[in-house]
Image (cartoon, rainbow, N blue to C red):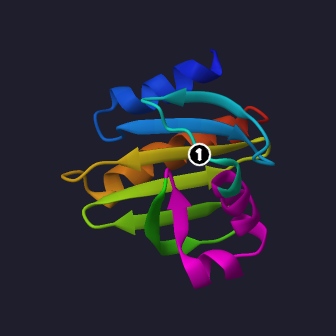
Amino acid sequence: MSWQAYTDNLISTGKIDKAAIYSRAGDSVWAQSNNLTLSGPEISELARGYDDPSGLQANGLHLQGQKYFLIRNDERSIYGKHDAEGVVTVRTKQTILIGHYPAGVQAGEATTIVEKLADYLISVGF
């Protein structure tokens, strides 16, 4: 399956409205849907946040120019919320998965979808 197919599958759930897959280092985009493109500083901030959360804890998470309140931050997952929408990011062995969910979607539903894809990718070596 192509990387683009993974982002398209996230979108097809109806719970994620934008998705992207970046390299684990954050230095290249492997796939994106619905124009979820991060600036260089945004993806660098996110990639660093898995190993050193202090910047995200102090300043929040920034994606596509929007600041998200940090809900969760550990070596695997970073979640952010802005008003009624949010973002779920998960780091695997080789990727960073990013899923944005719109207002009207429960955070738990979106989280489960992105985390399950991450589990699958980890199980097949990615």
| First to last magenta residue range | 42-64
Q: Residue at x 47, y 45 (%)?
A: 99
Tag 1: amino acid: Leu
The residue tagged 1 is: 38
User: Where 27 sits versus 41, above or below?
Assistant: above
Q: Is residue 33 left or right of residue 50?
A: left
Give the number of marks.
1
Instruction: Name the dominant secondary structure of the magenta segment.
Output: helix
Is 45 included in the stretch rendered in magenta? yes
User: Where 47 sits versus 51, above or below?
Assistant: above
Q: Quadrant of the C terminus?
A: top right
Q: Residue at x 18, y 52 (%)?
A: 104
Q: Residue at x 54, y 46 (%)?
A: 98
x and y percent of residue 86 in the render?
Answer: 37, 58
| Front one among 126 and 32 | 32
x and y percent of residue 111 in the render?
Answer: 43, 54
Q: Residue furthest left?
A: 104
